[in-house]
Amino acid sequence: MKRDLAGSRILITGASSGIGRSLAEQLAAKGARVAASARSGAKLTELADALNARGGDVLPLQADVTVEADRQRLLDRVVDFFGGLDVLINNAGVASWGHFADSTEEILRQVMEVNFFAPAELIRRAIPILVDGRQPAVVNIGSMCGRRGMPAWTEYSASKHALSGLTEALRGELARFDIDILIMQPGLTRSDFSHHFLRNEGRMPIDFSAGMPPETVAADIIRAIERNRTETVLGSDARWFLRFQRFFPRLLDRLIARRVRKLYETS
Ligand SMILES: NC(=O)c1ccc[n+]([C@@H]2O[C@H](COP(=O)([O-])OP(=O)(O)OC[C@H]3O[C@@H](n4cnc5c(N)ncnc54)[C@H](OP(=O)(O)O)[C@@H]3O)[C@@H](O)[C@H]2O)c1
């Protein structure tokens, strides 16, 4: 199946920066009708104004995805404005970086709220709308940490594993409505992600500036949506890493444990 995104009505969460913003820009350029959502209303308005000036059809919608009333309002506004919804892209996400033992319940719950409960509940509410959509699909933005948990990314890894499990389980359920559900598992991406960490105390040096440009990640995600690929790992580093994990999980455990011990020996 080839999905034609021109004219599609698409809701993107987390569209104020990084991957979500690039998705909004590229989908609008393809002729999709885009509802761009996030908490930063001013950034969304500026984005929508710029894209609409170039002939786009972009609706900025300020919303906090962790708030139930905001999720309902989002969908209501999309239906009012576009007359329906064809593709829901759950992209909003946050992370906390640092060891779990020194973290807090509040951080764990916040990461799960944004990365898991919000997309799950948005999907539940969107199903009755997507049923009437054209080539309808839910697209979840996971992470390579959604297939291999990483130390110091414990809450984040758990939330993205939960999202992977939800996606797999729902695939069978949504088949009876002819709604596709896809998941994207990006590797390291150059975005504002690290500026939004709930906690920034990890010891392993990670250079986000060396990650993939968000424009490239967004272009690969759009290609995967058009080709209706159920799961796509984005980035050659992530693909190699997950391949290594599949064939040598014990060896990877040992290598990671050795690295963590070393990082903590030097303190
Ligand atoms: N960067 C990476 O290396 C990487 C790798 C793998 C996967 N990912 C995933 O890719 C997705 C996008 O991340 P990014 O790299 O583009 O990071 P980003 O630049 O920090 O973008 C995150 C987006 O989520 C929004 N957001 C956060 N909390 C929200 C909330 N409660 N309600 C509504 N919107 C919220 C932010 O907007 P506001 O602050 O305006 O609300 C922002 O637009 C995330 O799901 C992330 O887990 C990123």
Image (tube, grey):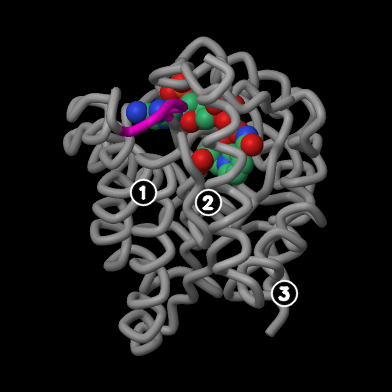
At x 62%, y 74%, the residue is 246
* The residue at label 3 has a CB less than 8 Å from ligand 1: no
From the top left corner, tell me how far across and down residue 204 is, in percent. Answer: 61, 27
Distance of mark 2 from mark 3, alpha carbons? Answer: 24 Å
**Residue 98 lies in the magenta stretch:** yes
Residues at circles 1 and 3 in contact by the CB criterion of under 8 Å: no
Q: Which residue is drawn at 62% across and 21% down?
A: 192
Question: What residue is disc 3 on?
Answer: 227
Q: Nearer the viewer, residue 15 or 36?
A: 15
Residue 60 relative to residue 168: left or right: right
Disc 1 marks which amino acid? Ser
Mainly helix, strand or loop, the magenta region?
loop
Q: Which residue is drawn at 39% across and 72% down?
A: 132
What's under tag 3, amino acid-wise? Answer: Arg
Residue 7 seen by the camera: yes
Magenta residues (range): 96-100
Instruction: Label 3, secondary structure: give it.
Output: helix
Q: Name the residue under label 1.
A: 159
Q: Quadrant of residue 29?
A: top right
| Residue found 32% across the figure and 27% down from its top | 64
Q: Does the residue labelled 2 lie within 8 Å of ligand 1?
A: yes
Q: Name the one closer to the observer, 20 or 2.
A: 20
Q: Mark 2 points at which residue?
A: 145
